[in-house]
Every structure is written in C-alpha cells, then in structure tokens.
Image (tube, rainbow, N blue to C red):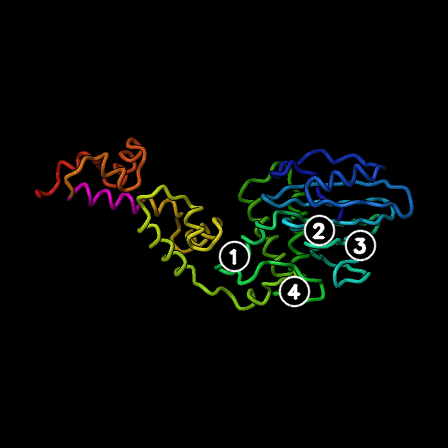
Amino acid sequence: MTGFPPSSGDGTLLAPSPRSTRLTDLRDRVQDVTVVHEIEPRRGRPDGTVAVAGLGALNLVVVRYGAQVTVDAFPTRNRFALTVPLGPMWVSAPEVAGEVLTSGFALAGDAHTVMRPDPHAGALVLSTRMSRVEEHLGTLLGRPPRTALRFLPPNAPAAGPAALLDSAWRAACLALADARAPLGPAVLRALEDQLLTAVLLGLPHTSSAELLDGPADEPADVVERARAWLEEHHAEPVTVADLARASGLGPRQLQAHFRRRLGTTPTAVLRDIRLGRAHRALLGADRTVAEIAHSCGFTHLSRFAQEYRARYGELPSETAHRRRPV
C-alpha cells in the first residue's frame, strides 16, 4: 500500500506532505488527527512521510518513519484509535507482551501501547471519537449496548473475521487514491460507515457477543415507540436529539431506523403529526389560527401557513371558516 494523497478532512485531496527527517514533525502531524504519543529513535536516520485523509468523523493516516523507532501511544481515553501494521510490528500493551502483530488492533483506552513499526512499510492509523463508534454500535444492534464499549486484546474472539477490517481500510485507501476531485458527502458517509462496521465486527470488544446475537428490536418496534413519543410531545419544542434520548438511541441510529422503516425522517413525521392535529383543531375548535398553531408546536405562523397549504390545499384561515357549528 503506497498511501493515499492527503486530505483536508472532507475528502478534498491536497498535495502530498513533504518528507521529514524530524521525528517531532512526523509525530505532530499524526498526533493532530489521532491520539497523543511520543516517538523515540532506535536505529537509522529518520526520513518519513505522513498522509492524512478525513472520512466524515474518521481520520485516516499512513505514516512511515524511514528509521527504526519506538512509538509510545498514551491511553486513548475518550477517543478510539486503530493501528494497522503495514509490515511486521512489535507491540507491547495490556495482555499483549511483546508480540509481533501483522493485523489491525485497537490502542488501549486506559494504558500505554508501545509499538515498533516497520521503518519502511509503516502503519495505517484510523481515529475518531469513541462516542462515534458507540453510536454506530447502537445502529448495528438496534438498541444501546448492554455494557460500556471497550476494545479487547487481539487474541480475544471478535464478531466477524479480521479480513473484514482489512478489506474495508484497503477499499477506503483505494477510493482516496483514485479520486481526482473531492469525494461527495454520500461517498464519504458510505466509507465512514463501512469502516466503522468493519471495526466493530473485525475487532474484539465487550459487545462482540451481542453483535453475534443480532438486533434485539426490529426497526418497526423502535419507530413505533418513537412515533408514539412524538404524538405525546408534539406540542413541545422537541428536536431529533430529544427523541433519540427518549428512545435510547443515537440521532444517526434513529434517523437510519426511520429511513429504513418509513422512508422519511423523524422531523418529517413530527411535522405530519402537528399538521394533522392542527387540521382537526381548525375544523372543530373555536380558537384563533395562531392559538391552534402554537398549541400544536408551530412557532412561526408564516411557515405553518405554508406547510399547511402544501398539505391541505388551502390556508389555515380557510379551513377555520368551514368550522363545524358548535
């Protein structure tokens, strides 16, 4: 793997970074988009390169030092970092006592991970917020995981074969390397989701067994519960984030369930509920249009009138004129 062209973080390709003989320069370029670490020289004169690309919330880095070095990665804490050796790599971490690894592994969240990458083959690093990985795990499970997500040593069982992860990062690198223009949002999102899925299936972690069991809730159950919550709270200034918290899911998980089940978004469903309530109230209640609009959750009267007319073919005031006698 020769390394993809660097990116601005949104799929826009930039000129390749210059070679550097300063380990601090190489460290800083990698550390800016991954996790805190230190580098100590062991043998040879550094002559390294760094290539960076962004795929949505993910950062991908290919780094080569050109010399034998020791990389000491600090505990990742609230970040996730995957290291993929592009050549044999000596690794020392909790429950990994000086082993030579050739496949991807997660850096420890609460301890140091010490690595000696191949000086010329280098390594690929994928990093993002841990909350983004947890959110995607919830999407795969269809519900929040039973336990806090924590990645385990490489010798623990995973939900799927390691080849899933290998094929996913290679596909992402090839897509970036072949691009002649900035990648579109749909492509970036697809690559981001593909990599996160491969990480959660190909690496061992505390929810691997849950992934083998499959989703506990069908999307229909999740969506119906969310729709019922919207019916109950439609008059309040609710957001997708509010609905997601009430449903025990992340916003993206919830959006994905609505798209698969209904072909629409939670926001559109809330608008439909509010419009339906307003329509019934305009036909049967002796209140002003403004009072009814506000009671149904609409805060902008002009926008309410536009959306109402688009749905019912007439203005709210025209519906009110046809109100049934009380």
Q: Amino acid at mark 2?
A: Pro
Tell me the distance, in whole angstroms, between the alpha carbons under discs 2 and 3. Answer: 23 Å
Please tell me which of labels 4 and 3 falls first in the chain.
Answer: 3
- State the SS at label 3: loop
Discs 2/3, front: 2
Circle nearer the N terminus (2, 3): 2
Q: Main secondary structure of the magenta part?
A: helix
Residue at 32%, 46% in the rendered image = 234
Q: Quadrant of residue 109?
A: bottom right
Name the secondary structure under disc 1: helix
> Which mark is nearer the camera, 4 or 2?
2
Of mark 1 and mark 3, the one earlier in the sequence is 3
Q: Is residue 73 left or right of residue 233?
A: right
Q: Position of residue 84 (x, y in %)?
A: 73, 53
Query: Label 3 amino acid?
Result: Gly
- Residue 138, numbered circle: 1
Determine the residue positioned at 46% across, 55% down. Answer: 248
Q: Is residue 307 visible?
A: yes
At x 80%, y 62%, the residue is: 97
Q: Is residue 170 visible?
A: no
Nearer the observer, 73 or 13: 73
Which-is-in-front pick, marks 1 and 3?
1
- Residue stretch in magenta: 272-284
